[in-house]
Amino acid sequence: MKIEATGKTVDVAIENALKKSGLTIDEVETEVVSQGGFLKQCKVVVTKKLTEGEQAKQFLENVLEKMGFTKTVVEMSEDKDAVYINLVGTEGGVIGYRGEVLDALQYLTSLALNSKKCFKRIVLDSEGYRAKREKTLIQLAKNLEQKVKRTGKAVKLEPMNPYERRIIHTTLQDSKYVSTESDGVMNNRHVVISPKLTNNILNAPSNGRRNLNFVYRSEKKKRR
């Protein structure tokens, strides 16, 4: 939104423009069109500053258009800490394999905002994909917990982004049977689910169970 106004001085012209727009001086960018002169008034144009969320939305719309996603609608809301963007009417590839394209767009949008000294967190989703993926990962973590408990062997998951790894860690953080850790570097960073040593009967603390006595038998004695 651009508002033009005039006044005897630049300050008066700006004040008149702010009255017209209903905005404060902190909410606008000011351009002095004319310094005035003999029998001429000063002229200014004030333009409403975009919020961080509006900047993110504008950037993402431009990127999506260049990618060919012309039918995608960008919905945005924001609070003091984060910008929440939802892509509606997406055309398949905007999400990508397990959210790879969505993650890349989220990262690019964060970089674009940071370059303008805006440091809100960007949360990009597409018609509930994140929630569906989270539900899938939670169930996967629980299934693998039972597998590791049953087999006593660690399981290495496929590479995941930090957000998805955090879901696995959080789901199993209170597990009595397994522990989790991240391993690998860069794009190969993944979660490893390992059995807790206390689940191994040889290392388990005494809890009233009958002690097991293991007797070694030589091959000669076994054949008798």
Image (tube, rainbow, N blue to C red):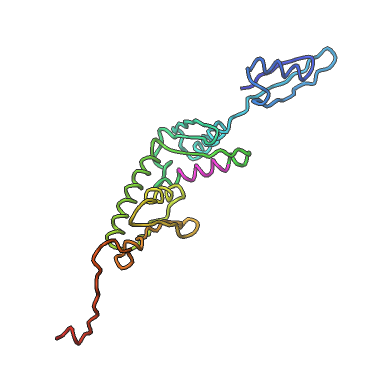
Q: Quadrant of the N terminus?
A: top right
Observer-nearest of 80 and 112: 80
Whether the magenta-drawn stretch holds residue 108 is answered as: yes
Query: Which residue, as the protein is rendered here, is positioned at the far right?
Result: 38
4 relative position to 187: left or right: right
Q: Quadrant of residue 11?
A: top right
The residue furthest left is 224
Q: Is residue 2 in the magenta section?
A: no
Give x and y (percent) for residue 84.
Answer: 48, 35
Looking at the image, residue 41 lies above or below residue 110: above
Which segment did they paint magenta?
102-111
User: Residue 119 sits in which quadrant?
Assistant: top right
| Residue occupying image coordinates x 44% and y 57% | 182
**Between 203 and 127, which is closer to the camera in this rendering?**
203
In the rendered image, which quarter contains the C terminus? Answer: bottom left
In the rendered image of this protein, does residue 117 appear above or below residue 214?
Answer: above
Q: Position of residue 183 (x, y in %)?
A: 45, 59
User: Residue at left 32%, top 50%?
Assistant: 142
Nearer to me, 110 or 71: 110
Query: At 62% across and 41% down in the image, what residue appears?
Result: 115
Residue at 52% over, 31% down: 79
